[in-house]
């Protein structure tokens, strides 16, 4: 074998060694990815089982909303957190639009810091989404107005999910000023709001309370620890009790409250949000139920 042949053979050996090294490294990387994926899947499965356990707790009428079972640290790796709320703390957007109560809806937007003109435009766009015609409202938008835009086309039907509202023209205004806006709406709540659940902003827009009255009511409702949904919470059970708490009510306020609110509102469904966590991996399940689990209206996992 001459020198050139020896050199060529050496190059082949080096290339073969290099390729073999790459193959070994790739195999090791794939094995590591497989192991990591398997561990993640295992943690996710375990977190889901915890979340399902939480839903079972939430559906049990014997368990109070402040029961220690709903917030558990299970060793160093596992956690369970269950939140139980009446859906009556959220405005039924379909009912509100069907009743053509546009002024109140615009007032809620204004409570979130949206100016009067934009609040009117958002309200008209919501109206155009559900109405049966293709005629644009004064500040609204129908399909002909939205062609070529990134906004959702009006479906001329009630909203099927609260998330659909985010496709409305200029809804980014709401998302900027009220990132948790979705917590204020529902498609499953009844027409009556629950005094024990609603936010101060909803109290002002729908009950016509002043800011001072609404904040006083929320503070009173939260009890001595000033925290919502704890054992010392105080329920609002009558108009007379409400008047004492807020320092009196005008005729317009009483009328708004009688029309839109209900004391001890047992008709609304219950929202149960159960989150299981295992070694940093979360699994959340949201269930909306009637009668603490007698009937499931909504189920979402993520």
Image: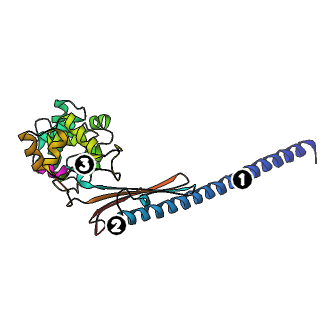
Residue named by callout 2: 62
Q: The magenta stretch spans which residues?
A: 93-99
Disc with the residue nearer the chain's start (3 vs 1): 1
Q: Residues within 10 Å of mark 3 (few under 14, many from 20)?
A: many
Helix, strand or loop status at disc 2: loop
Q: Which quadrant holds residue 250?
A: top left
Q: CA distance from mark 1 to mark 2?
A: 60 Å
Helix, strand or loop status at disc 1: helix
Marks 1 & 2, CB-CB < 8 Å contact: no
Query: Is 40 on the left or on the right of 26, as rendered?
Result: left
Kindly report the secondary structure that dominates the magenta region of the rendered protein: helix
Q: Residue at x 86, y 46 (%)?
A: 10
The numbered dot on residue 23 is: 1
Q: Residues within 10 Å of mark 2 (few under 14, many from 20)?
A: few
Residue 212 within the segment the image draws in magenta: no
Disc with the residue nearer the chain's start (2 vs 3): 2
- Tell me where residue 298 appears, x and y as whole percent: 30, 61
The answer to whether any part of residue 142 appears in the image is no
Query: Is 271 on the left or on the right of 191, as rendered?
Result: right
The answer to whether any part of residue 282 appears in the image is yes
- Tell me where residue 138 appears, x and y as whole percent: 10, 36
Q: Residue at x 70, y 54 (%)?
A: 28
Residue named by callout 3: 185
- Tell me where residue 112 appears, x and y as whole percent: 25, 35
Q: CA distance from mark 2 to mark 3?
A: 28 Å
């Amino acid at each position: 074998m001459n020198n050139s042949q020896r050199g060529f053979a050496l190059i082949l050996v080096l290339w073969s060694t290099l390729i073999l090294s790459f193959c070994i490294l790739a195999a090791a990387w794939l094995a590591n990815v497989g192991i990591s994926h398997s561990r993640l899947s295992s943690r996710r499965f375990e977190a889901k089982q915890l979340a399902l356990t939480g839903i079972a707790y939430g559906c049990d009428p014997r368990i109070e909303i402040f029961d220690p079972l709903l917030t558990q640290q299970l060793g160093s790796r596992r956690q369970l957190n269950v939140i139980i709320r009446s859906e009556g703390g959220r405005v039924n957007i379909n009912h509100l639009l069907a009743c053509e109560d546009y002024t109140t809806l615009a007032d809620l937007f204004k409570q979130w810091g949206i100016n009067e003109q934009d609040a009117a435009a958002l309200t008209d766009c919501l109206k155009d989404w559900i109405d049966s015609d293709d005629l644009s409202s004064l500040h609204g938008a129908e399909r002909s107005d939205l062609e070529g835009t990134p906004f959702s086309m009006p479906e001329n039907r009630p909203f099927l999910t609260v998330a659909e509202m985010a496709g409305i023209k200029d809804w980014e205004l709401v998302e900027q000023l009220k990132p948790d806006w979705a917590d204020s709406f529902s498609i499953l709540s009844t027409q009556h709001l629950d005094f024990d659940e609603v936010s101060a902003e909803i109290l002002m827009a729908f009950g016509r309370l002043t800011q001072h009255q609404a904040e006083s009511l929320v503070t009173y409702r939260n009890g001595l620890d000033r925290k919502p949904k704890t054992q010392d919470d105080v329920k609002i059970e009558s108009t007379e009790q409400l008047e004492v708490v807020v320092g009196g009510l005008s005729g317009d306020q009483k009328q708004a409250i009688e029309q839109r609110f209900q004391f001890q509102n047992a008709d609304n469904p219950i929202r149960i949000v159960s989150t299981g966590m295992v070694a940093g991996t979360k699994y959340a399940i949201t269930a909306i139920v009637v009668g603490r689990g007698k009937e499931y209206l909504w189920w979402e996992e993520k």
